[in-house]
């Protein structure tokens, strides 16, 4: 299941080499180039970005703007905003990709598999009948049937239609 060819990953790895410092989420927020960074939604205190290491097609991350490790470090407004954005994100994926269900979760700490343990993020993984089971989804890479740019466009188009 590992080492499948995925051009966006190669691009991302080369990107990482040139910018090894700092927090990936804080960096993309500061940069303000949402299209380049694949940020699909923003709210007052949070944003939704495509996962460049997707477990499954349509895998996105809902992230608080503030660099905190744990939900407990967010204030009430930030937590509410994060949950509201999670809901909007789910509705957007419902509309754009029509999955059969979701795995939604947070990995807290490196031992739990958090890729970027310093900055809290909620995984939203849409699921379809016939895709892999959740455990292989969490531990291996797999073929992603749609490129991230195509996915970004689909979510963006669905978002435009909502307004
Ligand atoms: Zn950060």
Image: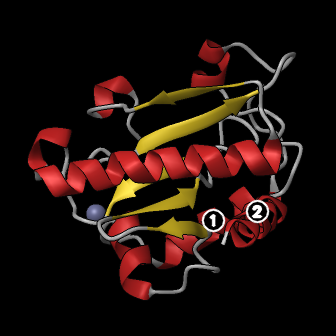
Residue at image point 70% right, 68% down? 11
Q: Position of residue 109 (x, y in %)?
A: 26, 33
Comparing marks 1 and 2, which lies closer to the viewer?
Answer: 2
Q: Which residue is mark 1?
A: 12
Q: Which residue is mark 2?
A: 158
Report the image quarter containing ligand 1.
Answer: bottom left
Pointer 1 residue Cβ closer than 8 Å to ligand 1: no
The quadrant of the rendering that contains the C terminus is bottom right
Q: Position of residue 156 (x, y in %)?
A: 72, 69
Q: Residue 89 got which mark? A: none
* Mark 1 or 2, nearer chain start: 1
Residue at image point 50% right, 59% down? 48
Residue at image point 11% right, 40% down? 72
Is 54 left, or right, of 103 in this rendering? Answer: right
Q: Position of residue 36 (x, y in %)?
A: 63, 80
Q: Position of residue 44 (x, y in %)?
A: 32, 71
Please tell me whether residue 53 is drawn above or below residue 31 in the rendered image: above
């Amino acid at each position: 299941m590992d080492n499948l060819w995925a051009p966006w990953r190669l691009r991302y790895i080369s990107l990482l080499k040139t910018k090894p410092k700092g927090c990936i989420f804080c960096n993309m927020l500061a940069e303000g180039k949402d299209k380049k960074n694949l940020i699909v939604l923003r709210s007052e205190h949070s944003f939704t970005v495509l996962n460049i290491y997707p477990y499954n097609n349509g895998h996105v991350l809902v992230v608080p703007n503030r660099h905190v490790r744990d939900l407990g470090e967010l204030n009430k407004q930030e937590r509410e905003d994060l949950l509201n954005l999670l809901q909007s994100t789910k509705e957007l994926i419902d509309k754009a990709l029509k999955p059969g269900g979701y795995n939604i979760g947070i990995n807290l700490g490196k031992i739990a598999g958090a890729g970027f343990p310093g900055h809290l993020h909620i995984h939203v993984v849409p699921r379809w009948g016939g895709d892999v089971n959740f455990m292989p989804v969490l531990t291996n890479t797999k073929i992603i049937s749609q490129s991230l740019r195509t996915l970004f466009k689909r979510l963006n188009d669905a978002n435009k239609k909502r307004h």
